[in-house]
Image: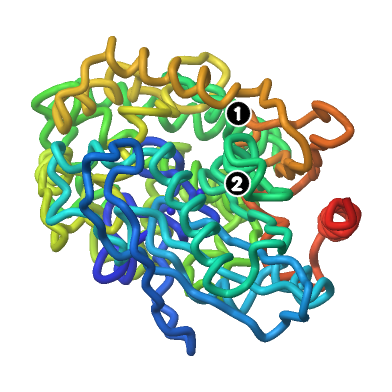
């Protein structure tokens, strides 16, 4: 949907997340997660801290920790609502306290604004490290209880007990916004659940199917060329004699070595990730977050793939990889699974993936799945099947395939999946965004409306408006504002 601080967000690594407010699931789950540079913007908003229980569901456990939040009272008018922006699988980015559509609504409605960072991400460290033993306190259920306690205590401390609260979030935080309204309807009056994948599933090949369609919407030949290139690469990987050439073609940081199926799958997924990330965030107005690569769009990638002067489709595929590396100022592409495995196994808060990587993959293994596999013939890539993703759960957290499947079923049982039943939640989704396949895209009821925005990508309605926005995106933002005004009168 996303977040943490420090080197994880402030430099590009092999797989990284995009922001926090709109988590992007890119790291073996949500393409948060994204292969873009996280935000390092400095703002005038100071860190605030709130005392939370470590385990909300064990009254005998009195341990506590400090959770980071931000507050903006510039627009607040006496008796106005309270807006709560929910952080996700990465560091909470205070740039969202200065930009974003939710602030337009806040100014019109006289709202007090909070943003609460998700436990175990950013600077919100509930435990001494990220060991599997400690990560058992990381879950959407605990995060929702954090939100509930924050809302209750902050309401009492600031005299807001009778105020109407509205939750906002995008991607995984969008799901949390919907589930907060579902599970704590007495605390939150309404929610805007943007690009929210509310249905958990172990296998999510539909993600890449949407990537195919989104590429084809730019140029029908584009996904066919990508598939031809990917197939050629997979064929060459069968012959170790090609490895030196492949290493040079894709500017790898070390000579390609494929000692197991995990090595080849990771390499192929890393290359496919360029297309996956660009499709997910195509033309989103993300510059204010400090995000690099926002100008690389579906049109740009398909333009490279259609450029016959670069050679055969395989060579154009390699050119895309080099383009993305140049975009993020990478000297080379680290596509070695052994390095990823080493970094993912580092449980220190100073580890290279402590910004969100180790934590988010844990959540996919214990709650959501969301694995973007190549287990569908209707997509352009190959070589990273579901088994590749599931094996990581066992390697990193000792979570078996059976336990994973049970956990995903429990998540849908807890929240309802597509069949969520409550009131006053709006579900905006972008039709280009692959995550819309797990979201609510048709009205469930008059008080659970869906807005499917053609031609837009992940969390597009959350970003600041600009002149080149599609008319339907502007209309969607206006529609959400009207709904909030109506709901706040109820």
Is residue 324 toward the left or the right of residue 206 in the image?
left
Given the current orientation, which residue lies at the most extreme top position? 402
- Work out whether residue 371 can be spotted: no
In the picture, residue 295 is in which quadrant? bottom right
Quick check: 224 above or below 186?
above
Going 53% across and 29% down the picture, which residue do you hit?
A: 208
Q: Secondary structure at mark 1?
A: helix
Q: Which residue is mark 1?
A: 438
Task: Please report the residue visible at 72 percent of the width from the left and 31 percent of the height from the top.
Answer: 422
The quadrant in which residue 448 appears is top right
Mark closer to the chain start, 1 or 2: 2
- The answer to whether 353 appears left or right of 23 in the picture is left
Residue 206 is situated, as x and y percent measured from the top left of the image, at 56, 23
Q: Is residue 148 above or below residue 226?
A: below
Front residue (pair 235, 344): 344
Mark 2 element type: helix
- Per the model, the C-alpha gap separating discs 1 and 2 is 15 Å
x 80%, y 68%: residue: 468
Q: Would you call the spot at circle 2 few (<14 residues within 10 Å), some (14-19), or many (20 or more)? A: many
Determine the residue positioned at 78% across, 42% down: 424
């Amino acid at each position: 949907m996303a977040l943490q601080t420090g080197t994880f967000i402030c430099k590009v690594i092999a797989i990284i997340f995009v922001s926090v407010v709109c988590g992007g699931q890119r790291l073996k789950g949500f393409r948060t997660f994204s292969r873009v540079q996280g935000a390092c913007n400095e703002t005038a908003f100071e860190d605030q801290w709130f005392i939370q229980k470590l385990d909300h569901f064990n009254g005998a456990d009195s341990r506590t920790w400090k959770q980071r939040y931000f507050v903006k009272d510039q627009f607040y008018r006496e008796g106005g609502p309270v807006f709560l922006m929910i952080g996700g699988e990465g560091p909470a980015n205070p740039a969202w306290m200065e930009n974003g559509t939710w602030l337009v609504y806040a100014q019109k409605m006289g709202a007090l604004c909070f943003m609460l960072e998700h436990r175990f991400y950013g600077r919100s460290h509930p435990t001494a490290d990220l060991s599997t033993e400690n990560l058992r306190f990381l879950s959407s259920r605990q995060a929702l209880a954090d939100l509930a306690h924050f809302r209750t205590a902050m309401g009492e401390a600031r005299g807001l007990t009778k105020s109407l609260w509205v939750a906002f979030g995008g991607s995984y935080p969008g799901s949390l916004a919907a589930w907060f309204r579902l599970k704590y309807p007495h605390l939150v009056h309404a929610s805007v659940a943007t690009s929210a994948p509310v249905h958990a599933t172990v296998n999510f090949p539909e993600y890449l199917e949407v990537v195919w369609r989104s590429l084809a919407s730019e140029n029908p030949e584009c996904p066919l060329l990508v598939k031809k290139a990917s197939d050629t690469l997979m064929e060459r990987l069968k012959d170790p004699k090609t490895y030196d050439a492949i290493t040079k073609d894709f500017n790898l940081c070390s000579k390609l070595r494929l000692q197991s199926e995990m090595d080849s799958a990771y390499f192929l997924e890393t290359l496919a990730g360029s297309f996956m990330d660009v499709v997910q965030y195509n033309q989103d107005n993300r510059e204010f977050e400090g995000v690099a690569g926002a100008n690389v769009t579906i049109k740009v990638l398909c333009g490279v793939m259609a450029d016959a002067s670069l050679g055969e489709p395989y060579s154009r595929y390699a050119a895309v990889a080099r383009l993305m590396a140049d975009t993020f100022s990478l000297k080379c592409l680290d596509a070695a699974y052994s390095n990823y495995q080493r970094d993912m196994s580092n449980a220190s808060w100073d580890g290279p993936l402590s910004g969100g990587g180790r934590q988010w993959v844990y959540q996919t293994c214990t709650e959501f799945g969301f694995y973007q596999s190549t287990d569908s013939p209707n997509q352009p890539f190959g070589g990273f099947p579901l088994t590749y993703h599931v094996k990581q759960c066992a390697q990193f957290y000792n979570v078996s395939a059976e336990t994973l499947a049970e956990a995903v079923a429990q998540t849908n049982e807890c929240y309802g999946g597509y069949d969520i039943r409550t009131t006053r939640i709006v579900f905006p989704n972008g039709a280009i965004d692959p995550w819309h396949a797990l979201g609510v895209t048709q009205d469930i009821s008059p008080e659970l409306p869906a807005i499917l925005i053609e031609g837009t990508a992940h969390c597009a309605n959350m970003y600041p408006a600009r002149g080149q926005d599609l008319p339907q995106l502007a209309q969607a933002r206006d529609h959400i504002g009207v709904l909030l005004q109506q709901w706040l009168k109820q």
